[in-house]
Amino acid sequence: MSFSDKINPFLVDMNNCLKNGQNNAALFIALALPDICSSTDMPRFGNTVKKRYTQWIDEYFIKQNGYDKNVTMSSNDVYLLRCAYLHSGLDKLTQKATSDIIEKFVFVFSPSKTITMHRNSIINNGIATMQLDTQKFCREIEKSVNLFIEDSIDNKTVEDNSKNILHVQNIDEGFAF
């Protein structure tokens, strides 16, 4: 299986979660995808989780999605969001002293899809807050992952390391090690 074959089930699951209104599950997947991608190329992105994650976000997410322009969000802010949300479910960045710009994140969604509130920087009670639309943020992560997939074609390191990406296997189709 290629890297693309190994990463695609995560993108499919994220999109299915978004379609079914499972926004928290979609956000969990979206925040984990840079970890998975960057871990397949440690020589390029580094050995520590923070270094890998932030370098991947810098290279594949920030500029490609315009977060370096009108709305400023650093790779370190995204990493701290990942840590706060995945490890403790928090919206406030607990390592405030190390955050670059943002102290708190708010994710929103509109089932009617008539209202879009994305990339709003707000100072609320003195707390620098970034409001993001869950669907749009997940699509931006997906776009970044697809760019990484394109860049990783013929990258032996990524292909070799992707063989170890864990997947839930459907045993009705046969069990393989």
Image: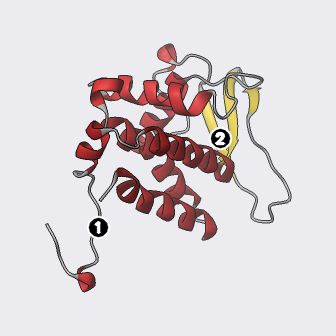
- x and y, in percent, of residue 77 in the image: 54, 25
Rendered residue at 36%/43% (across/down)? 36
Rendered residue at 37%/22% (across/down)? 51
- Give the vertical position of 100 relative to 52 (above or below): above
Q: Give the residue at mark 2.
A: 106
Residue in the foreground of this view, choosing between 3 and 46:
3
At label 1, counting other C-alpha atoms closer than 10 Å, the crowd grade (few under 14, some 14-19, many 20 or more) is few
SS state under label 1 = loop
At label 2, counting other C-alpha atoms closer than 10 Å, the crowd grade (few under 14, some 14-19, many 20 or more) is some
145 relative to 3 in the view: left or right: right
The answer to which of marks 1 and 2 sits earlier in the sequence is 2
Query: What amino acid does circle 1 point to?
Result: Val
Q: Quadrant of the N terminus?
A: bottom left
SS state under label 2 = strand
Q: Quadrant of residue 177?
A: bottom left
The label shown at residue 168 is 1
- x and y, in percent, of residue 171 in the image: 23, 80
- Give the vertical position of 53 relative to 115 (above or below): above
- x and y, in percent, of residue 33 in the image: 44, 45
Can residue 87 be seen by looking at this rendering?
no
- Residue closest to the far front: 154
Mark 1 touches mark 2? (CB < 8 Å): no
Residue in the foreground of this view, choosing between 60 and 71:
60
> Of tags 1 and 2, which is closer to the observer?
1
52 relative to 131 in the view: left or right: left
- x and y, in percent, of residue 154 in the image: 35, 42
